[in-house]
Amino acid sequence: MTESAMTSLDRRRPEPLWHQAERAIRARIEAGEWPAGSQIPAEDRLCDLLGVSRITVRHALRNLEALGLLRREHGRGTFVRSATVVAGARGLTSFSDEMAALGLTVGSRMLEQQIVPANARVAAALEIEEGEPVALVRRLRLGNGSPIGVQTAHLRLDRVPGLLDDDLSGGSLYGQIERRYSIKPSEATEIYRVGAVGPEDAELLEIAIGSPAFIVERLAIDPRGPFEFTLSIMRGDRYEIRSTLRI
């Protein structure tokens, strides 16, 4: 589809024009017509292409920027960002949910799936004895086929007996344990730190050793108590935290 083929929006639909504009722009990005790093048409050109006002176009662009799909540079224009997961003020979601919210295709590669003794940190988080067996699930997480993070989940084995008999390579781990064990997290605590990527994770994430990364600890809890402790190493160039502060 060429630029001139971009159709005007339908004012008869109940969907707001800014939302229609947002979807039209996003569709071009997801189709690869405006690839990562490319500059999209200027606001006045988008107004002509979509048949809407500059206010409508700006509303759509602001939303897409907030989602991490666009990057606006003063004096230069608006550019398509590399696929980036934007974390910030949000509900309790899985990695798969975050990917879907950004319009990215989630993917995983199983790295390790076994029963291991809980170390002191894991045992304290899950409120079990050190050395007690836990289910370990370590996966390379992908967005649109590119590595974003390495996630290592530890789950209380007494809460998820037989879990490791399942194929856990893809999809949401939360979704799987909810379907099989009726376990649904009611809250979670996350701690973010910045660190350097070690040799093994650097190779998996396809970045240089020592590159900056977010090191994220998450403890998930349901009404019966903590059931999952996850350590994630997220690429610093593909994962960012954005928060809205209000007075």
Image: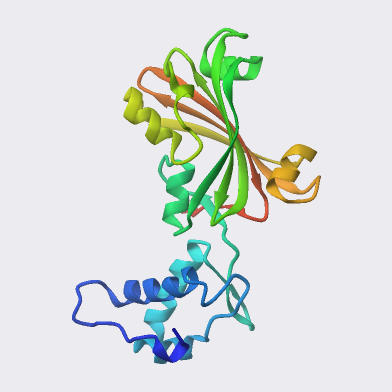
Taking the spot 46% from the left edge, 74% from the top edge, the residue there is 61
Asked if residue 177 lies left or right of residue 143, the reply is left
Asked if residue 220 lies left or right of residue 148, the reply is left
Q: Quadrant of the N terminus?
A: bottom left
Give the image location of residue 87, x and y in percent: 52, 50
Looking at the picture, does residue 24 appear above or below residue 189?
below
Give the image location of residue 38, x and y in percent: 61, 77
Give the image location of residue 124, x and y in percent: 58, 15
**In this orientation, does residue 242 appear?**
no
Looking at the picture, does residue 134 appear above or below residue 182?
above
Q: Nearer the viewer, residue 167 or 184?
A: 167
Taking the spot 67% from the left edge, 51% from the top edge, the residue there is 236
Asked if residue 146 lies left or right of residue 180, the reply is right
Quarter holding residue 186: top left
Count of numbered badges drawn on the protein:
0
Taking the spot 63% from the left edge, 72% from the top edge, the residue there is 37
Q: Nearer the viewer, residue 234 or 221?
A: 234
Give the image location of residue 233, x and y in percent: 65, 40
Taking the spot 63% from the left edge, 19% from the top edge, the residue there is 121
**In this orientation, does residue 103 appear?**
yes
Looking at the picture, does residue 242 appear above or below residue 199?
below
Which color scheme does this rendered protein use?
rainbow
